[in-house]
Image (cartoon, rainbow, N blue to C red):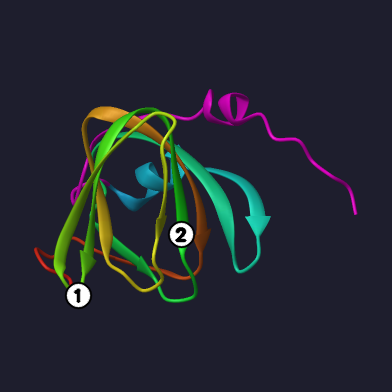
Amino acid sequence: MSIKVIDIEAELKPLPTLISRGEETPAAEADAAFATLASYRNGGIFAVSFQGDSGWEKHANGDEIVQILAGATTLTILTDAGREILDLAAGMLVVVPQDHWHRFNAPDGVTVMTVTPQPTEHTFADDPR
């Protein structure tokens, strides 16, 4: 086994920032903006810079760790009690519980690193439940 040190900034530098991310963003454009930093357990560690709305996603096989590297975002998580809205900025980290729909909205831009179990379900429905 070899241990790999990952320079997140260097990995993100050649990648485009997704501008006006949303439902109309082509999948190829979104995929090109994501850095796959490492495989991890049943998923991976990813980083992306974007501005806009990520749409809803959820992960049936585990919790997702989200760390804000730069900028700010609002993270909305759907819980049994309703919508939990979290304002996150650079340096903050949150664990999104397994199988909970969540989405990011970053009108001014954000760089996010996630530890994400796979597979991931995606939708832009108003309420994905």
Is residue 21 on the magenta stretch?
yes
Mark-to-mark CA distance, 2 and 1:
18 Å
**Quick one: SS at disc 1?**
loop
Q: Are marks 2 and 1 in contact (CB under 8 Å)?
A: no
The outermost residue toward the left is 126
- Left/right placement of residue 38 relative to residue 112 reads right
Taking 13 as reference, is 104 above or below it?
A: below
Amino acid bearing label 2:
Glu
Where residue 56 is drawn, which disc sits there?
none
* Quadrant (top left, top right, bottom left, bottom right) of the N terminus: bottom right
Is residue 69 on the magenta stretch?
no
From the image, give the main secondary structure of the stretch colored magenta. Answer: loop
* Quadrant (top left, top right, bottom left, bottom right) of the C terminus: bottom left
Q: Provide the residue designation for mark 2.
A: 64
Quarter of the figure with residue 128: bottom left
Quarter of the figure with residue 44: bottom right
Where residue 80 is drawn, which disc sits there?
1
Look at 22% across and 69% down and name the residue there: 79
Mark positioned earlier in the residue sequence (2 or 1): 2
**Residues packed near mark 2 inside 10 Å, few (<14), some (14 to 19) or many (20 plus):** many
Q: Which is more toward the observer, 16 or 79?
A: 79
Quarter of the figure with residue 91: top left
Image location of residue 4, percent across then percent down: 79, 41
**Residues rendered magenta in the picture:** 1-25
Look at 53% across and 47% down and name the residue there: 46
**Quick one: SS at disc 2?**
strand
Image location of residue 13, percent across then percent down: 53, 23
Image location of residue 113, percent across then percent down: 48, 42
